[in-house]
């Protein structure tokens, strides 16, 4: 089907093989190549359509964004024009990243502005949450690692996204069949697994170059996910970190971030609404991402990644029982509890086995390589172990 892009057309549906709308006569191909198939979104500034690129043999799908503001007022219209132009500029600069849609074209046709961008085939995280349920800690950690690197790329180019939320994060569909509910923890959320996470909708993105950071602008973004300073028109890089933290809270609790915040006590209470428990380490990271005072929040993506990866290593390291420490009472001479000779002999024999290898394989242990030298190596090891034994037991010679 071809869909007419004339906003006033009473019957926009057309067959595939026509170039002009049968109802209003408008051209159906943009720039003689992009054909709209169906509308997939609408906002105050225009409409979004699924389309195909007729100029390429494979006719790949793409997205057409039509600028058609419905809001009234000169200032509002001027802001709408600014944002639409801004999105084209941002995508042109950022779209080479594999997790940001690529800008394919930007032009004016029949007095209307159009932006054509790469189509990301997949579900957004709000849809995924509705279909599969609350996310687990493993999924949130992998999501953070995946998306923080995208933000790192944007911030390095002085771009603040300003509208991070589950609806603006799409998981690119993999070639493999989709997972069913309950299989979330079976396959890791990594490239080649479920597909990459793609950050979309840069219509609210703002350049942070020069004096832009010091200017108070328009409050833009979805209120549930917007940092307090951004509500006042003073978005900073840390504002994106706040929005990503609020997104994680929504995915963990299946509740609006508004419902996970106690306004009376000015504190987050999301932990009591968790579907599955999370570690104290992840809780601390998310709470720091969600600090209402910007200076108390993570200032850079690098800081979040550092804490996240350190905590991941700690969580993955098995607990090792500490060795006993012998402490002396205050003001008394130091004492040492000597192990018995039989204990020392046993420990030295184990050390010797580690040096020389054992004929009996140990389960779940990597066997040390066997020595390449002959009996002389054994004698040398025996001598060294005897010296160690003498140090433990003491020497009679003064």
Image: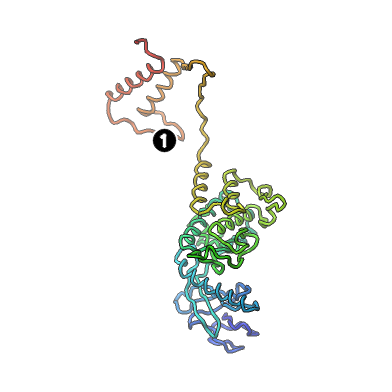
Q: Classify residue 44 by image quadrant.
A: bottom right
Residue 382 pos. (x, y %)? 33, 21
Check the picture and name the quadrant holding the N terminus. bottom right
The relative height of residue 332 versus residue 186 in the rendered view (above or below) is: above
Nearer to me, 263 or 358: 263
Q: Quadrant of residue 64?
A: bottom right
Say above or below: 112 vs 214: below
Whether residue 365 can be seen here: yes
Q: Name the spot of residue 235 as percent of width and height, x first.
A: 57, 61
**372 relative position to 311: left or right:** left
Task: State left or right for residue 170 relative to residue 255.
Answer: left
**Above or below 246: residue 369:** above
* Residue tagged 1: 366
Q: Is residue 65 above or below residue 174?
A: below
Q: Dot 1: within a 10 Å radius of its alpha carbon, few (fewer than 14), some, or many (20 or more) residues?
A: few
Whether residue 187 is visible here, answered yes or no, is: no
Q: Quadrant of the C terminus?
A: top left
Along the line of sight, the residue nearer the viewer: 340 or 270: 270
The residue that appears at 53% across and 59% down in the rendered structure is: 237
Viewer-proximal residue among 185 and 394: 394
């Amino acid at each position: 089907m071809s869909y007419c892009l004339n906003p006033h057309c009473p019957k926009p549906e057309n067959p595939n093989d026509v170039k002009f709308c049968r109802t209003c006569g408008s051209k159906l191909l943009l720039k003689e190549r992009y054909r709209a198939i169906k509308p997939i979104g609408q906002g105050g500034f225009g409409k979004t359509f699924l389309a195909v690129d007729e100029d390429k043999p494979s006719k790949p799908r793409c997205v057409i964004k039509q600028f058609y503001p419905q809001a009234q007022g000169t200032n509002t219209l001027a802001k709408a024009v600014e944002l639409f132009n801004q999105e084209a500029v941002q995508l042109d600069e950022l779209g080479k990243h594999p997790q940001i849609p690529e800008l394919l074209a930007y032009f004016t046709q029949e007095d209307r502005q159009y932006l054509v961008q790469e189509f990301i085939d997949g579900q957004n995280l709000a849809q995924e949450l509705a279909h599969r349920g609350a996310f687990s800690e493993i999924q949130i950690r992998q999501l953070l690692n995946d998306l923080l690197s995208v933000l790192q790329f944007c911030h390095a180019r002085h771009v603040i996204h300003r509208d991070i939320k589950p609806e603006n994060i799409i998981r690119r569909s993999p070639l493999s069949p989709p997972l069913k509910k309950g299989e979330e923890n079976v396959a890791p959320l990594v490239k080649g697994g479920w597909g990459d996470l793609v950050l979309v909708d840069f219509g609210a993105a703002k350049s942070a170059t020069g004096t832009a950071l010091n200017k108070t602008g328009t409050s833009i973004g979805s209120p549930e996910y917007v940092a307090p300073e951004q509500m006042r028109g003073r978005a900073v890089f840390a504002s994106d970190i706040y929005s990503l933290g609020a997104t994680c809270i929504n995915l963990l609790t299946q509740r609006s971030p508004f419902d996970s915040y106690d306004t009376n006590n000015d504190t987050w209470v999301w932990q009591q609404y968790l579907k599955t428990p999370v570690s104290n380490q992840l809780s601390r990271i998310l709470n720091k991402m969600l600090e209402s005072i910007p200076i108390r929040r993570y200032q850079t993506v690098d800081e979040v990644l550092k804490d996240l990866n350190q905590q991941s290593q700690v969580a993955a390291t098995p607990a090792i029982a500490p060795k006993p420490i012998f402490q002396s009472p205050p003001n008394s001479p130091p004492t040492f509890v000597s192990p018995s000779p039989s204990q020392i002999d046993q420990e030295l024999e184990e050390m010797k086995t580690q040096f020389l290898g054992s004929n009996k394989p140990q389960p779940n242990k990597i066997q040390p390589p066997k020595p390449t030298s002959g009996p002389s190596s054994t004698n040398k090891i025996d001598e060294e172990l005897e010296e160690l034994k003498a140090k433990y037991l003491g020497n009679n010679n003064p």
